[in-house]
Image: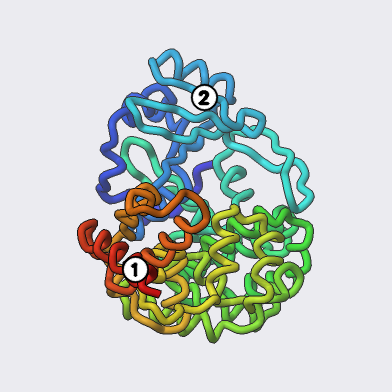
């Protein structure tokens, strides 16, 4: 059924709506007959005046029919998630996820068994939050809203569709999504949703740590991450899965310093601010972070040293250097637009100066490097002079 309010808006003009291939895609999916509509983030973010990263379309057509229609219209069809009704359409270079309308048959908190439907409201009812259950006509931009998502969008409120406890029982990850979307869009917290998430926090234990990590890292760089993390700590949300997170004070200081330095928020750096140095290795392993992210997490609290920001960046890399400096409230101005240079002298130049190949070359090269760093990374000529001076000094001993 399409029983919706009569005062619903149309999508405003936005760059993504003019992407090549969308008109051909609309024709192939029967948009003129009401068989396909934009849904989710593209609709929500356009109404908020935000940039749109991903385009999703919902359709009444079954997956096999979607593929047939796309291929018949000269559009590439990739069955990326066909068991759950999703086909990726590539139309004139524009990538769109096309998903058949669905209803949940059964759920276990981690995954759902679905059946296809042709009922728009039924499809909307299975989604998580009202602001994510907004649909728009592919051609006219007419918005369809069955659950008050437009009012919630206006109020900057993240609200579960229907009973929050039921939505959480269907997918426990919605607990973290509730806070992530609040950190990104929210002004007023929905008390019913907050109560349900607090009471069902232990459900997070049933989720894979990869899914938890993905949500947490997105949350940590959201506009209201600091306030939201503090609220989550107060409500005991982290206790079942990340008991190491108990205080947001260091995160608060870091976020303020990032802003003062004009540095973009970084999820790994902010995670480091939330945990004790001794917990970094265990948390990184538990969340199954990448090797590079684990290395950063473990190195973040090792301090900035006393050689200066550029020397630190040369020794440990710009990312880790930036983390260390910001976490202790020091400036990163010297690192802006600067890339660590390479030592302009090698072992061959040391051998050419009369030193036999072997450990002695490496020792001398390390000494040259230390002086080169101390002098601010001079050019090859001055570095050669450093080597000569060092060798003369040693020969006079």
- Residue displayed at 69% across by 59% down: 285
Name the outermost residue toward the front: 396
Q: Is residue 225 visible?
A: yes
Q: Is residue 167 visible?
A: no
Residue 322 at x, y percent in the picture = 41, 70
- Element assignment for label 2: strand
Identify the residue under disc 2: 78
Image disc number at residue 13? none
User: Is 83 placed above or below 231 here?
Assistant: above
Residue 235 at x, y percent in the picture = 67, 80
> Would residue 160 appear left or right of 332 to someone viewing this image?
right
> Would residue 2 appear left or right of 379 to someone viewing this image?
right
Q: Nearer the viewer, residue 259 or 189?
A: 259
Q: Quadrant of residue 159 in the image?
A: bottom right
Tell us which disc is closer to us: 2 or 1.
1
- Element assignment for label 1: helix
Mark 2 and mark 1 lie on one chain; the one further toward the N terminus is 2
Identify the residue under disc 1: 390
- Residue displayed at 41% across by 60% down: 365
User: Is 315 placed above or below 171 here?
Assistant: below
Q: CA distance from mark 2 to mark 1?
A: 64 Å
- Residue displayed at 48% across by 83% down: 252
> Would residue 175 appear left or right of 151 to someone viewing this image?
right
Residue 336 at x, y percent in the picture = 28, 67
């Amino acid at each position: 059924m399409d029983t919706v309010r009569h005062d619903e808006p149309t999508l405003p003009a936005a760059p993504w709506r003019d992407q090549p291939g969308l008109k051909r895609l609309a024709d192939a999916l029967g948009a003129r007959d009401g068989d396909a509509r934009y849904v989710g983030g593209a609709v929500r973010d356009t109404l908020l005046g935000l940039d749109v990263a991903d385009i999703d379309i919902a359709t009444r057509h079954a997956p096999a029919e979607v593929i047939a229609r796309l291929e018949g219209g000269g559009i590439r069809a990739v069955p990326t998630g066909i068991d759950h009704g999703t086909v990726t359409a590539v139309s004139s270079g524009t990538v769109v996820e096309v998903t058949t309308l669905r209803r949940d048959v059964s759920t276990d908190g981690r995954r759902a068994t679905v059946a296809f439907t042709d009922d728009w409201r039924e499809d909307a009812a299975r989604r998580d939050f009202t602001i994510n259950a907004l649909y728009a006509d592919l051609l006219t931009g007419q918005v369809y809203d069955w659950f008050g998502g437009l009012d919630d969008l206006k109020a900057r409120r993240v609200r579960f569709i229907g009973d929050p406890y039921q939505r959480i029982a269907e997918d426990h990850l919605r607990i973290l999504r509730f806070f992530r979307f609040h950190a990104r869009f929210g002004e007023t917290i929905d008390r019913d949703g907050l109560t349900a998430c607090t009471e069902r926090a232990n459900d997070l234990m049933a989720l894979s740590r990869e899914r938890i990590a993905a949500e947490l890292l997105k949350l940590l760089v959201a506009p209201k991450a600091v306030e939201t993390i503090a609220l989550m700590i107060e409500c005991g949300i982290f206790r079942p899965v990340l008991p190491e997170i108990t205080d947001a004070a260091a995160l608060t200081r870091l976020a303020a310093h990032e802003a003062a330095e004009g540095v973009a928020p970084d999820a790994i750096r902010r995670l480091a601010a939330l945990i004790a140095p001794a917990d970094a290795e265990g948390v990184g392993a538990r969340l199954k972070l990448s090797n590079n992210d684990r290395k950063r997490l473990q190195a973040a609290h090792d301090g900035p040293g006393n050689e200066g920001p550029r020397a630190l960046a040369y020794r440990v890399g710009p990312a880790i250097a930036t983390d260390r400096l910001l976490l202790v409230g020091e400036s990163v101005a010297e690192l802006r637009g600067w890339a660590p240079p390479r030592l302009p002298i090698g072992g061959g130049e040391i051998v050419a100066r009369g030193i036999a190949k072997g450990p002695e070359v490496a020792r001398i090269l390390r000494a040259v490097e230390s002086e080169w760093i101390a002098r601010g990374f001079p050019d090859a000529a001055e570095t050669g002079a450093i080597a000569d001076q060092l060798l003369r000094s040693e020969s006079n001993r």
